[in-house]
Image: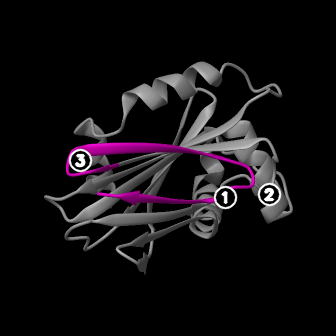
Amino acid sequence: MAASLFKWLSGGRLMLVSGAILSLLLLSARPHPLYIAVTEINHNAKDKILEVSCKVFTNDFETVLEKVAGSRVDLSAAKDKAASDKLIADYVGRHLRLKVDGKPVQLHFVGSENEEDGTWSYFQVNDIQAVKRIDVGNDLLYDGFNQQINIMHVTVGGQRKSLRLDYPDANASFQF
């Protein structure tokens, strides 16, 4: 899985524009007026997988994960990496749901990393030959912030579509 993560990260497939915008918003760990998460979904036709990445403010993610865990969460602590990754995988698995061509699919956790004040988490869905439609249920961080905005970018066959979900809206569909 890590090799797959490296391959799709090094291939430049993540959309740098949304990452740059979110990085500009991630200026401090202090409370901030915007609560934004960006989810990228890319169909890798060659490897027949969906590559999924989510970027959120680290402090917001820690706040929500602390509610789930019932204890303090520090996503930047190297000694707690395995426990943090399990919390991230479980949380995102419950709050980001995908259907490809009407069939529910399972996200497989690939890894996570911290970047300035943001946390990236990476997932993939295996054995996706072709995509005509992706339905997304995305309520990431809605249980922590009623001002949450979830931006999604979905790319299939080189065609990119984007959508913004404002709390409490959580469902979107992308046709290709």
Give the residue at mark 2: 143
> Magenta span has 162?
yes
- The majority secondary structure of the magenta stretch comes to strand
Give the residue at mark 3: 7
Going by the image, does 148 lie left or right of 130?
Answer: right
Q: How far apart are marks 2 and 3 (CA)?
A: 33 Å
Numbered disc 1: secondary structure: loop
Numbered disc 2: secondary structure: loop
Instruction: Count residues near mark 2 (Cα–Cα under 10 Å), then give few for <14, some for 14-19, many for 20+.
Output: some
Marks 1,2: beta carbons within 8 A: yes
Percent position of residue 4, x then y: 27, 55
Instruction: Count residues near mark 1 (Cα–Cα under 10 Å), then give few for <14, some for 14-19, many for 20+.
Output: many
Residue range corresponding to the magenta coloring: 155-176
What amino acid type should be assigned to the residue bearing mark 1? Asp
Going by the image, does 95 lie left or right of 127?
Answer: right
> Magenta span has 141?
no
In the depicted view, which residue is nearer to us: 26 or 159?
A: 159
